[in-house]
Every structure is written in C-alpha cells, then in structure tokens.
Amino acid sequence: MKSNRLGNSTIVFKNKPRIESYYSMVGQKEAKGPFKKYFDYILNDDLCGKKSFELAEREILERTIIGAIDKGHVDFNEIDFIIGGDLLNQIISSSFSARHFEKPFIGLYGACSTMSESLAIGAALIDGGYANKTICATVSHFSTAERQYRTPLELGNQRPPVSQWTVTGAGATILSNSAKGNYVSMATFGKVTDYGVTDANNMGAAMAPAASETLVEHFLDTKRRPEDYDLIVTGDLGKLGSEIFRDLMEHRGYKLGGNYSDCGQMIFSRDQRTFQGGSGAGCSASILNSYILKQMDAGKFNRVLFMATGALLSTLSTQQGETIPCIAHAVVIEREQEKSTEKVNNTQKKPKIKRSSN
Amino acid sequence: MNKEERNKKYLAYVSSKSPKTREWPTLFYAFVIGGLICCFGQLVNDTLQMWFPAMTETELGAWTLIVIIFITCVLTGIGVFDDIARFAGAGTIIPITGFANSICSSAIEFRREGIIFGMCAKMFTVAGPVIVCAVVSSTLVGIVYLLI
C-alpha cells in the first residue's frame, strides 16, 4: 500500500497514466496575449450567444471537453469519469455541464488549483486500474467571477495595482491507460496554508506561501532539486506572487532559476492593463493545455512540474474579515522518451520560457 | 517561530513588496475629470436658466442633477462609463455620477436574476450604504435643528 507513496504528500503513478488529448479555449482578451497561436480555439463573443455569462461559462466548458474528445479522436464510450471544477458557487458550471455528458462526474473545488487537483485524481484513478480514460477539465470566466467575488461589471471603480484579471478560458486533458504519450508521473497534494493575508485583491501574496509549502514538500519527498525540471510552473500567482514565491523558496534553500514561470504572469502582455497578470481556474488550465503540453510534444520540455494554486476564500469570509487560506497541488508531467531521439533531446540547449515582462 | 509571529513578519514583507497606487497621477486625473464634470454641471445649469428664466434656484439644481444622472446612466448602459472612471477614480465617484453609476450598474448586472428579486432588490447593493448614511445623518441634523 505504501509503496506508491513518497514521503508525506507525494504519490507516484507507476502505470504511467498518459495524456491522450488536450484542448484549450480562451476569450478575446487572452488571445491578445503572447500565447495566441497555442490556443486551440478563440471565442469571438464572451457571451457565446447565450443570455448570461453563467450560461456562457458552461458552454465554454462543454465545448472544451468536446474539443478534447474530437482532437484526440477519443471514443466517448471509453470515457469513465469526468473530473472538474470551476469558481462559481456550488461549482455550477462543471456540474451543470456534466449532466449533458451522462458520465460519472467527480466535482472538485480547489478554486484556481482545480486543474492540477483534477489531473492528480484522474491519474490516480487510471493508475489504480479504476478507469481507462478520464477527462480532467476546468473553466473560469472573467464576468462571472467578477460579479460573484467583486463588483458589478459596469461599476466605475479603480482596480488596485496588486489585483489580477480572471481569465476567460477553459482547458481539458484526457488521461488514459494507453501505451504511448506523455504521462503524469507523480502528484504532490498540498496542505491548506494561511499566512494571515486578508486583502482579497492581493491573491498572489496569499497563495505564494501555499505554493512554497507544496513545492518544498515535493522536493523533500522526491529528493529532487529545482534543476531536475525543465519547467516549474505555478498556476496564477501573478507577477507579485511569483516574486514572493521565489523569495520564499530561496529562504527555504531552493533557488529557482530561469526554469520557473507562472501561468498568470505569462498569459497577458504588459500593455493589457491587468496589473499582476491573470488568475482563475481557466488560467492555468488554458496555458497547460496549450503552450506547455504542445511544447512537450515538440520536445522542448521533458519534465514539467505543474502546480496550480488556489485561494479558498468566499465573499462571506472576506466580508467577515477572515484571512485567506490557500492551497497548491503539484503534478509532474514527463515526456515519453523515444529511444532514438532521447540523446538528441538531451543535448539540446536549455529551453527558453516565454514570459511577459509586466 | 510561532505562527502569529511568522504571519506578522510575512505581512510586513508583503506590504513592503506590493506596488502602491501612484498618488500624484491618480490625484491629477481625479481633479481634472471631477472638475470637468462640475464645469459641465454649471454649463447645464446656466443653459437651463437661459431657456427657462422663470425657474427658481432649487428647481434649476434639481434639473441639472437629472440631466447628469441621465447622461451617466446612458454611458453606463453602453459600457463607456467604467472606462472613463478607470482614469478618473474619485473624479467620477464623488459627484452624483458615482452614485448614479453604482445604482445603474447594479441594476444591469442583476437583471438576469429577475425584475423583482434581481434588479429591484439588488439595485442598491453598492449604493445602499450611501442612502443609509444620508438618511441617518439627515435625521440627526433634523433632531439638532429641532432642539436649537
């Protein structure tokens, strides 16, 4: 039983759950960022022709899941579980979407950390032989998140400089027990961490300690170092959050080099006026299922640690003056090394990580 | 190190690291755009006075407010007001424009949840405290006025 566990928090998938297909969909604003060419689909209308933004968010998730199935030519009958979540109260986007698919559904809420949480659980189900194929998907929408967590869209207020912009987008990954493809090799589940931040605008500062706890735990469990990864990517710490995260990691004895980046910081460019960058469950999901996995397919990255971070607050807890508990889950995705190309890839120069400089 | 101490240290570090709102540009835009709105109000006031010389000072003031509230609501409805307010900050919040926008934007936002429990009930989510404040303070002033 314990043989598949490393240390306190890490589980190892010995049967290599493979990534069979992946798909990403984003809105217009995200497409104006530096990663336009990597996204599978760009929405023209963030209402998707629907009456409300909530309906649009559901539509985005449904289209993304169908997109992943079509892209990988996956037989829908072979899907065993749909695992996913979103930011709305009672995760209505995921569960309401799931009723159309008529498949066993595991709804998760890890705020913006849901993508890595769903991958970890999906991989565990496959590794344990409980499933042949699982779909892991998350979504977020700027307009629904804004009205739930903040103020009406048309209200004329100024955003503070520490704030982030919720990404309109979704990502879906189909994991399977097939024999070929990149695979999820490990997952480290995070602990709920709270360093006393109460400012709901400063999510990066609230989440950075959770991310550092999980990453330190991962390194202790696996006896690895930051250099063992081609890319270490956090979910949506943003610019400020990732700087704090770097400092915290250095303080714990792990200096992160040029192989560290953050999806929130990457997704928007400087001139898009998002202050610290993107956030939301769709931020890490869309970057993972576009840029990161495509670059892995292309052989640019061989081993990636993907760690989505989530702030587990609600509007009630914020109004009652509570501090913000946060969480981060990490999954390790490895490239299937083909014997003939292995040597060539190892001698390639270090991959450059695209990063916006805002 | 216990948790309280750790958190205190961390929060101090975060606040030293977090970027602050740039005061001078913010004040400048608020002053200029707020001033322009006031000038526009005066223009409306003077024009009304020219057209309707019989109007009293109070009536003129009321009509000026109505015109500015109407323009604000139209701008909010077509999605322009928040773009102006992003630069203006307090310049658009302090005049009646801020109050009109807060009610109008809430009304638009919650229309999907129905007319009665959505729009009508939630119209005052942002402006509610202002109304309460106005009612309470006017009551207090009224009591003081009664006593002296």
Image: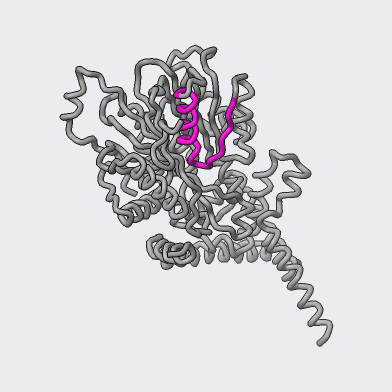
Residue A48 falls left or right of residue A358: right
Q: For residue A294: magenta? A: no
Tell me the residue at 19%/29% (across/down). Answer: A346
The type of colouring in the image is: one colour
The x, y position of residue A1, in whole percent, is: 46, 30
Say whether residue A210 is visible: yes
The residue sitting at 36% across, 30% down in the picture is A333
x and y, in percent, of residue A118 in the image: 49, 32
Q: Nearer the viewer, residue A258 or A34?
A: A258
Quadrant of res A81 = top right
Q: Position of residue A104 (x, y in %)?
A: 60, 22
Residue A280 drawn above or below residue A62: below
Viewer-side residue, B103 vs A236: A236
Report the span colored magenta.
A105-127
Which quadrant of the figure has residue A234? Answer: top left
A72 or B63: nearer the viewer: A72
The one nearer the camera, A8 or B5, is A8
Tell whether A224 sits left or right of A151: left
| Residue A16 point in image, percent of width and height | 38, 23
Q: Is residue A273 visible?
A: no
- The mark total stands at 0
- Magenta region, main secondary structure: helix
* Image position of B145 with respect to A216: above or below: below
Q: Is residue A235 above or below residue B24?
A: above
Residue farthest to the right? Answer: B146
Q: Compared with residue B119, is residue A336 higher up or lower down, i.e. above or below? A: above
Please check the rendered image and state whether residue A116 is part of the magenta-colored stretch, yes or no.
Answer: yes
Residue depicted at x 46% and y 64% = B2
